Image (cartoon, rainbow, N blue to C red):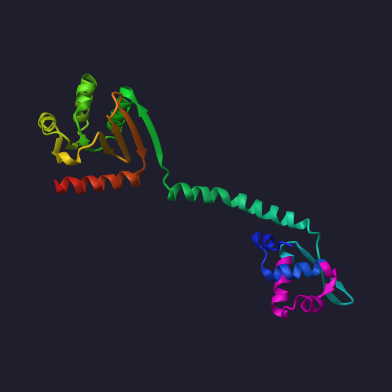
Amino acid sequence: MELDILEEIGLTKNQIKVYLSLLKLGLSPSQEIIIDTNLHRSPTYDALEKLEEKGLISTIVKDYKKHFQAESPNNLYSYLEEKKIKLSKLMPELEKLENTKKEKINATIYKGTEGLKAIHNDMLKEGMQIDVLGGKGLIFSELKYFITQWDKKRVKQNIKWRIIWDNENIKNEIIKKKLVTGKVIPKEFQTSSVINIYGNKVAIFSWENKTPDAFVIDNKEIANSFRKWFELIYEKI
């Protein structure tokens, strides 16, 4: 018999011994249970008390003496159902605790220039400083009109733009814009990707293909991690 299952649903080893003993013996006084289970008096009575609380045994006074008997094994289902009901009552509080303590990670993939526009508009919506690693200035050639209008809105909202560029010439051109500061990364560390950190989000752009792709992660902890790495690189170059 696989008795581990009874432990898994919340019965102790002593409770299992006593319960099985009563199933076998039938109506019995405590002394017979002690002899059959080979348990001491104290753990036997403790097991009997807990089993009665669980609705798995009952007591009867016979000849002025307390006797115990096991209820039907089907009562184990009732015991489990009662635990399920208690858990259901607790579940809303547990879920509320999870929502306040555990931050979820949301990630979205964007394709093409429309996706690029959507992300940059989201930067304005966040309204916080934008840190860029690996800036290439490609968006100024790909979406010249859009980015010009976008930059005016950025300045109006007083959003700072801090950039680590891949290209000295691009830096010299864009640095003239308001609220823009930055540095140039050494050539050996240049890549085909661009990372934008803003608010609680990280947007990773890939310019490897003709059509730009982007991957946006919305998570405070991850954004702060990228921001720290940006600060480290910014200080070192």
Q: Residue furthest right?
A: 63
* Residue occupying the point 69% across, 76% down: 43
Residue placed most toward the observer, 153 or 105: 105
- Estimate the x, y position of residue 19 in percent, counting from the top left: 76, 67
Magenta stretch encompasses residue 110: no
Q: Is residue 126 left or right of residue 7?
A: left
- Estimate the x, y position of residue 154 in percent, counting from the top left: 21, 30
Seen in the picture, residue 100 relative to 16 is either above or below; the reply is above
Q: Is residue 51 left or right of residue 204?
A: right
> What range of the chain is rendered magenta?
24-51
**Corner quadrant of residue 220:** top left
- Estimate the x, y position of residue 26 in percent, counting from the top left: 85, 68
Residue placed most toward the observer, 59 or 136: 136
Magenta stretch encompasses residue 44: yes
Seen in the picture, residue 137 relative to 63 is either above or below; the reply is above
* Residue occupying the point 41% across, 38% down: 106
**Corner quadrant of residue 176:** top left
* Residue occupying the point 35% across, 34% down: 215
Total marks shown come to 0
**Corner quadrant of residue 17:** bottom right
The quadrant of the rendering that contains the N terminus is bottom right
